[in-house]
């Protein structure tokens, strides 16, 4: 198989609050011989907040982000569900509305760019599963996660709204997503079936409505724990920031102690590949990953 | 004659009579389902063939009255529109039929929608204008003017978005997506004069649009494909465009991105929290900040990453900005 190569849209958290996501992403990309070319010109995607303030500006900036992948002739890979949705939404709108594309391109022209719609946008999870292939992943497993009961937490922005994601997430059904479950099984683990796997973590109102955010993530975590999960895994750093960093605040709001290790998707893959915890940035996780010897 | 394809399906059905039962229970019914049958056909079969006391709402049976909304395997559906075969494709041969909100169930599929209607009536869901009692001519609205409603007038008040919304589930004050769609619908009506009053209502902290968690459950739940969250975004936009945005944590949270992108290209996470919360409010985040710092999850201002071509980014922001925040 020819080596896979993508334009890597890093986003903001891997260089700040989730260095472990950056480390584990690069580590498993290297293990799979996947080349990630960083989009060094890219800006923040607006994180689904900037469009509330200035929708057009947010669209122009994301169109610009995509332009730099088009220039390189590469598909974009994201490692954050919200980056994925914001870029994919910009693409969806621009590809389906000629007038809007002309308005955006009029601005981009002033900095010598043009949006053409030639690059696809994919979350790393789906690049692994659909492009690299689940069997190819399984064949590289050195340490099967055989004693682990892992609760997949998909995160909203990778699965909803389904018409924006289309084939880029393998046409995942938002009411019964399967990709993370299949990945867990391919790595030798047990995937935990629970009602909240496709629910919200509450991250986006963490500042203005912490009570709401804590109750929403608390319900999801209790559901995973009640179904005997040893750990939860998520492809989204924003879900991770909520579920991992906020466990104390969540416990306080829910009135009971809620503690459970939370893995980033690439950390889980890396552990099964036999990559060292150091290289996967495990020391940065706040809830202790207690199952690593 | 072509033979119809049929499949045998087990339906696990939520049963509860608030007046008699202490607790709800589930009853199983098996049917051979034909390829063109919808969930409403199954509800009818249960009532007509198995148990005459089984209760559910239905009326128009063609997707316009909004009465027959329920959940199947937690997916909000309009019973009369949802083909059983499509659900089998997603969930397999056991389908769980439940009311929109089991906590509000009165009898079987029937829920008490009082809370939904209360939120709805909060947003002035009617035309406020000077309408002549005995007009001599029609009030003509142009195609361009009606396009601005963005199909929000197609809402059938089924409640699917409201009962799917996680913010509604944990916050009794939250107005919720259905009422926001209605507020948007009348705000975009050229005959209406209560735009600012409605914006005042949806601009409230704790109950208004700022508490939307951006999960897109409403967009998936809507049988009319109205994408309520897009209307919520447009209400946010109207609040800023009309200079009605208050200077608070929620508004600064949206505005802060622009300044940060201008300066770094990336979002400065620490600065966004400080700017949104203010110098005093930010103190409540100190405990988690210490935790994050100890685990190497907090960078110092001088370590802030920067995008290449900041001049280009700055220029693009200057020429593409459409709104100002005081």
Image: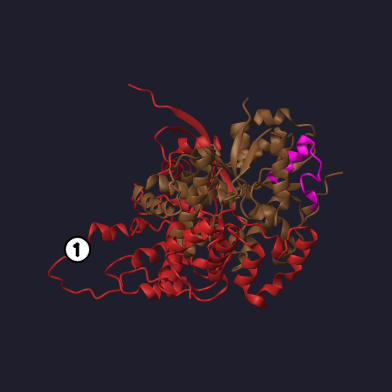
Chain colours: A brown, B red
Q: Is residue A126 visible?
A: yes
Which quarter of the figure has residue A149? top right
Could you say which is closer to the camera, residue A34 or residue B251? A34
Q: Where is residue A224 shown, x and y percent of the image?
A: 70, 50
Residue occupying the point 77% across, 58% down:
B296
Q: Is residue A156 visible?
A: no
Residue B12 covered by magenta stretch: no
Which quarter of the figure has residue A279? top right
Could you say which is closer to the camera, residue A25 or residue A262? A25
Q: Where is residue B183 shown, x and y percent of the image?
A: 39, 66
Looking at the image, the residue that sits furthest to the left is B136
Helix, strand or loop at label 1? It is loop
Could you say which is closer to the camera, residue A226 or residue B57? A226
Q: Where is residue B203 shown, x and y percent of the image?
A: 47, 72
Which quarter of the figure has residue B286? bottom right
Residue A265 covered by magenta stretch: yes
Position of B54 relative to B134 (above/below): above
* Residue denoted by label 1: B140
Number of on-image labels:
1
Q: Where is residue B182 shown, x and y percent of the image?
A: 39, 64
Few, some or many C-alpha atoms within 10 Å of disc 1 (few <14, some 14-19, many ≥20)?
Answer: few
Quadrant (top left/top right/bottom left/bottom right) for the N terminus of chain B: top left
User: Which chain letter goes with mark 1?
Assistant: B
Q: Is residue A229 left or right of residue B133?
A: right
Residue occupying the point 61% across, 71% down:
B275
Looking at the image, the residue that sits furthest to the right is A293
Query: What residue span does the magenta drawing correspond to?
Result: A263-283
Q: Is residue A216 left or right of residue B185?
A: right
Looking at the image, the residue that sits furthest to the bottom is B280
């Amino acid at each position: 198989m020819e080596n896979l190569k993508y334009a890597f849209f890093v986003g903001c958290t891997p260089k700040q609050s989730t260095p472990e996501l950056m480390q584990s992403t690069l580590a498993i990309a290297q293990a799979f011989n996947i080349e990630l070319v960083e989009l060094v010109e890219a800006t923040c995607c607006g994180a689904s907040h900037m469009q509330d303030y200035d929708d057009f500006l947010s669209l122009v900036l994301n169109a610009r982000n995509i332009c730099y992948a088009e220039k390189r002739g590469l598909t974009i890979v994201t490692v954050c569900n919200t980056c994925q949705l914001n870029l994919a939404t910009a693409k969806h709108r621009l590809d389906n509305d000629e007038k809007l594309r002309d308005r955006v391109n009029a601005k981009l022209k002033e900095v010598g760019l043009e949006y053409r719609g030639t690059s696809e946008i994919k979350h790393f999870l789906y690049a692994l599963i659909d492009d690299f292939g689940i069997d190819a992943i399984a064949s590289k497993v050195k340490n099967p996660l055989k004693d682990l009961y892992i609760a997949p937490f998909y995160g909203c922005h990778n699965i909803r709204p389904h018409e924006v994601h289309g084939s880029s997430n393998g046409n995942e059904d938002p009411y019964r997503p399967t990709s993370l479950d299949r990945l867990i099984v391919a790595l030798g683990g047990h995937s935990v079936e629970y009602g909240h796997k496709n629910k919200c973590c509450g991250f986006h109102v963490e500042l203005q409505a912490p009570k709401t955010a804590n109750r929403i993530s608390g319900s999801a975590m209790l559901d995973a724990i009640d179904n005997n999960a040893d750990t939860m895994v998520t492809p989204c750093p924003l879900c991770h920031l909520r579920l991992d960093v906020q466990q104390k605040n969540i416990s306080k709001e829910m009135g009971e102690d809620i503690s459970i290790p939370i893995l980033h998707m690439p950390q889980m893959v890396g552990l099964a590949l036999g990559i060292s915890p150091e290289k996967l940035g495990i020391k940065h996780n706040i809830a202790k990953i207690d199952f690593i010897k | 004659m072509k033979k119809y394809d049929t499949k045998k399906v087990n339906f696990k059905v939520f049963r509860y009579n608030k007046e008699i039962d202490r607790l709800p229970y589930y009853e199983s019914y098996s049917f051979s389902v034909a390829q063109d049958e919808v969930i409403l056909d199954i509800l009818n079969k249960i009532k007509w063939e198995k148990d005459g006391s089984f209760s559910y709402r239905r009326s128009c049976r063609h997707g316009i009255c909004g009465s027959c909304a329920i959940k199947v395997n937690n997916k909000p559906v309009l019973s009369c529109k949802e083909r059983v075969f499509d659900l089998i494709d997603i969930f397999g041969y056991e389908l769980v039929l439940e009311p929109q909100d089991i906590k509000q169930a009165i009898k079987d599929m029937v829920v008490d929608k009082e809370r939904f209607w209360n939120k709805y009536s909060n947003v002035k869901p009617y035309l406020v204008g000077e309408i002549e009692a005995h007009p001599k001519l029609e009030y003509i609205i142009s195609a361009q003017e009606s396009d601005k409603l963005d199909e929000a007038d197609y809402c059938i008040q089924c409640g699917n978005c409201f009962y799917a919304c996680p913010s509604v589930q944990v916050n009794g004050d939250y107005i919720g997506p259905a009422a926001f769609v209605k507020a948007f619908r009348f705000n975009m009506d050229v005959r209406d004069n209560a735009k600012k009053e409605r914006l005042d209502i949806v601009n409230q902290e704790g109950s208004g649009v700022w508490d939307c968690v951006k999960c897109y459950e409403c967009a998936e739940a809507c049988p009319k494909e109205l994408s309520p969250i897009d209307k919520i975004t447009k209400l946010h936009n109207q609040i800023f465009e009309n200079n009605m945005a208050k200077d608070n944590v929620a508004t600064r949270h949206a505005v802060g991105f622009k300044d940060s992108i201008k300066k770094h290209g990336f979002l400065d996470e620490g600065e966004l929290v400080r700017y949104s919360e203010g110098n005093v409010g930010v103190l409540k985040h100190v405990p988690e900040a210490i935790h994050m710092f100890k685990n190497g999850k907090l960078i110092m201002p001088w370590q802030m990453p920067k995008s290449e071509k900041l001049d280009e980014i700055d220029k693009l922001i200057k020429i593409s900005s459409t709104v100002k925040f005081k």
